[in-house]
Image (cartoon, coloured by chain):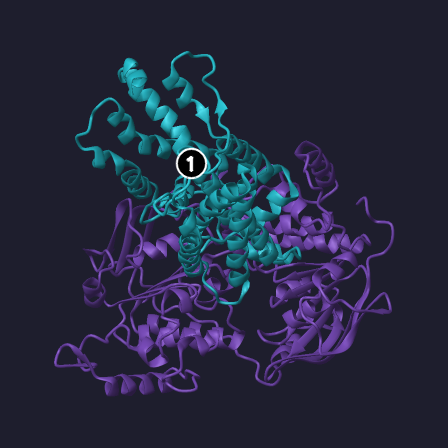
Chain colours: A cyan, B purple
Amino acid sequence: MTAASELGWWGVLFAIFAGAIRISTPYLLVSVGETITEKSGRTNLGLEGTLVLGAMCAFATSYLTGSPWLGVVAAGVAGASLGLVHALICNLPRVNDIAVGIALFLLGVGLAFYFGKPFIEPRGTMLPGIGFGFWSSNPAIRSGLEVNPLFILGLFLAVFLQWALVHTRWGLLLRMAGESEDAARAVGRSVQSIRTYATVFGGFISGLGGASLSLFYPGNWNEGLSSGQGLMAIALVIFARWNPIRCFYASLLFGGASAIGPALQSVGINQGYYLFNAAPYVLTLLLLIYSSSASYRLAGAPSELSLSR
Amino acid sequence: MMAMSVNTPPTVEVRNLSKRFGSLQALDSVSTRFASSRLHALLGENGAGKSTLVKCLLGYYQADAGEVAIDGTAVRISHPGQAHALGLGMVYQHFTVVPEMTVAENFILGKEKLPARIRWSDENDMLRAFMATMPFQLDPERKVSTLAAGEKQKLEIIKQLYLGRRFLVLDEPTSVLTPAEADEVLGEMRRLANANELTVVLITHKFREVEKFAQDVTVLRGGRLAGSLSQKEASKNALAGMMFGSNVPDRPRFSATAAANETAPYLRIADLHADGERGTPALNGVDIVVRPGQIVGLAGVSGNGQKELVEVLAGQRAAKSGAVYVDGKAYSGTRREIKRAGVSLIAEEPLTNSAVRSLSVMENLALRQFDEPPLTFGRYFLNRMQFLVLARNLIARYRIHASSPFARLDTLSGGNVQRVVLARELSRDVNLLIIQNPCFGLDEAAATEIRKQIVQARDRGAAVLLVSEDLDEIMEIADRILVFSGGVVTYETDRDKAEVYEIGRHMAGAHAA
């Protein structure tokens, strides 16, 4: 508090910036994962459940084994499993991916709450932060720039996937499955198996998002940990128009909006505090209104998505 | 000329091929031979078994009985990949390219073995070198959605050649092309066949193409072989006889009534602008006048704004500027205006766009008037008995084949769905009929009947705007012909003075030059 208030209004800006990096990690991972799933022509709305289950699994594994990195792997595996369930159910004829997603959202959250009960109290082993604030002697700056390693991973993933969508076999097949089922069938590729891989991959990445929630500051598990970030990340994919790099920028924007409330609080502004905490939700609404139109389709939307048809 | 011509293209034979779908015998012991390096036409009505035959050849379906032989040796083809490995390929009626990807990406995707990492500079160089040996050239880095229909068709064909296919089935390849484009594409196919590069099977229903380009003709009727003969023996009448059996549908030339050019226009579209699905301009200043007792045919290759125009007229899409006048008054497609002016509108694909597939035939027939007497009682209640009376009457008058008035609409065949919609729209007082691609996907007999209905509406004094991608249809029944290209009317002529090639040139966008 004292170190931050030394910085004055610059402190507020810095707190928003640092908060953006800290809070954006789950948004980033979930939206990148969902981008890959949606590029294949399927929507997985269950990622809020994936995020919460990932967070619980990560925390529990880290708590029981003492290794946060094992926790990260556990979160990914949990996410991939939910993705696999989604994919297998959607491969059946006449199954609606949106409805299955909502069911898995509830299932994921339910499982996490059920198995997570014993882990609510204790503090576990956290992931080590990467200190980008080494150049400063101000402790507020040092702790603010202590960056979640999963954020760095998410950034690399976004850049890599952007490249891979154009320059690899997998990227091409994925986009073909999402753009035209007929074309895929005409060249003898199985749309279903491509979509299965894409949903499992998307689930894995979103699970990592869960790990970033429970294994980094403040580093605990409770039932209110996610508060809808998985759902907002899906809205963010639309705003980012199915582009991994734009997902990164959009996540920072959302993270920054979430950090406005706490940042103002840190300089002693307590009036309208709850109003500022609602900023990301208001932002979601505004962005969706801004990016949709009654008369046009969204530019960049994969054509096979149930949303575009 | 082509790099891969080391041996002759395959001769493909089918022997006693049969295939059954439920109660329908789609193919009944068909035997025929597609000899190497020739252009074969495969002719037949809708449902004659043409698609089933080639899909069995290409491994999409498994035949119940019979076999396929390549160069005399029997082969088993159980999935499309095997057919591709044997050099058999197919170009579909509807484009199977991915519009949101580039030409090069579409080419690469067809390869059996894709490298894990794609080096685009190498691939693009290879493609350019290959294109240079091809009759058609396309820029590898262009997005497919920016190509014209003819270019997409060419892309489909060279993609097959690029993948090393030497036996090519073309499924009605010219249905979306202008006559000049069709001649160019088929001419090249014939040239490749003559040069020993390719065996071609052309599925078509256009006699003109058979006469001009085919060397051998195979005719199917009702799942059986109706005949195979060389093009020299194939006269129009002989082919029609084989295709339709004894009941050859007569194709009356519908004659225009007295020139309606003096009467006041009933529909007037003035400088209409509107955006398309993706927010880009689709209509760029459309001016159209339709007078009572006149069919105005709007010809054009699909995707030039026809869909958006019909949507604006239906009140489904907002115009950016400009106006539509019906009977001299501004018109925006509200229910009240529709009723007052007597407007009927039938969009393309009626099952999706002009009717409700999950409602019954009876309910679909009543959609225009279900909320007014005699179909209502006590103002807020529906009188189902009157629904049934109306439905029975229309089903008989319009010869709709449905198992019962209560059958779901999507259990009917395409022709009968179109009859249901026509019955609903034409059985009232019609002053203006707007109709889009009314005969798409229908067989010749159903199409003839539906065109007759349209002409009868005109003869009763209705103003008709016929928006169609089928130029033959427009030439057959329209009194005045307009060409639509790039969201504007680029050419107008009376039917008597119309020249197919001149119209085709404008359909292809020649006005820009």
On the image, the x and y values in percent for residue B339 come to 21, 68
Residue at point 39% right, 23% down? Answer: A144
Q: Is residue A161 left or right of residue B344?
A: right
Q: Secondary structure at mark 1?
A: loop
Residue B350, by quadrant, is bottom left
Question: Chain for mark 1?
Answer: A
Q: Who is closer to the viewer here, A225 or B87?
A: A225
Query: Identity of the amino acid at label 1?
Result: Gly
Q: Residues within 10 Å of mark 1 (few under 14, many from 20)?
A: some
Q: Is residue A271 left or right of residue B118?
A: left
Residue B397, by quadrant, is bottom left
Vertical order, B464 against B142 (above or below):
below
Vertical order, B95 against B392 (above or below):
above
Q: Which residue is identified by label 1? A: A219
Residue pushed farthest left? Answer: B378
Q: Who is closer to the viewer here, A90 or B220?
A: A90
Residue B144, by quadrant, is top right
Number of labels in the image equals 1
On the image, the x and y values in percent for residue A295 come to 33, 49
Residue at point 32% right, 30% down? Answer: A259
Q: Is residue A123 left or right of residue B215?
A: left
On the image, the x and y values in percent for residue A3 come to 32, 16
Vertical order, A171 against A163 (above or below):
below
On the image, the x and y values in percent for residue B324 come to 26, 53
- Residue A94 visible, this angle: yes
Quadrant where the N terminus of chain B is found in the figure = top right
Q: Who is closer to the viewer here, B378 or B465?
A: B378
- Residue B145 visible, this angle: no
